Amino acid sequence: MVYRAIVVDVDGTLTFEDRSLDCRAVEALRSLEVPVVIATGNVLCSARTASKLIGTGGIVIAENGGAVECGIVEYDTTYKQRCEEAFEFLSRHLALEKLDPENRKTEVGLRRNFDVEKAREMLKAAFPDIEIVDTGFAVHIKGKSINKGTGLRRIAELMGLESKDFVAIGDSPNDVEMLEVAGFGVAVGNAHPALKRVADLVTEGKHGAGVAEAVGELKKRREII
């Protein structure tokens, strides 16, 4: 199969652990003729900035699938109020610090300075429709039915494609659904074990080196141009 687009995570995939951009990935992505979509748990304005810096076409998935942009901007705010209620519930017992509250429209982002497992256990009974995802860079309180996979399906629709037309590349548990709905999934070498389990290819290279390795391998197979 020849894939018609790539969707790629940012933090930990296109960047190093200190969040500096790995130019090996940038060079590989810029060599492609197919569209490159940026997918991130970060807010839309940050996703747009990353897209410009990397040199992709401005098509993005943000807030773990809650926000998408492809000519038009769409937000799925279904769970926003529930996420805020979950935040208030947890805040009675834990010291939590929001990230980008003025820009985050579909979920609640938190700094990673609290016991995430304790928070998960606290939410199970009171908020069964809400989950907590730890990406290694931030913690997200989000609706269970919104994720990068649902975001990819919507972006594919806006592009006139199917999600199976995409190669998906990531490193974190919040990339699992994205790899599952894509036609081909790649976990870079530093990826979480949960992502490696669902990937079609696990690269030896970490971060941007893994992205470059995957692009090179798919070009070699003539499965992407």
Image (cartoon, rainbow, N blue to C red):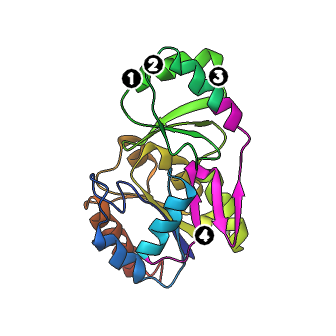
Identify the residue under disc 1: 115
Residue drawn at (42%, 42%), measured in percent from left and top? 135
Identity, as a three-letter code, of the amino acid under mark 3: Phe
* Helix, strand or loop for disc 3: loop
Which dot, 1 or 2, sits closer to the camera? 2
Q: How many badges with numbers are in the image?
A: 4
Q: Is residue 193 above or below residue 171?
A: above
Q: Closest to the observer: 20 or 6?
A: 20
Q: Which residue is mark 2?
A: 94
For disc 3, the marked residue is 127
Distance between the alpha carbons at the discs numbered 1 and 2: 8 Å
The residue singled out by tag 4 in the image is: 165
Rendered view: 221 above or below 154: below
Amino acid type at image mark 4: Asp
Mark found first going from the N terminus, 4 or 1: 1
Image coordinates for residue 129, horizontal then vertical, percent:
67, 29
Please give the name of the residue rendered at 38% of the width and 48% of the height, measured from the top-left corner: 196
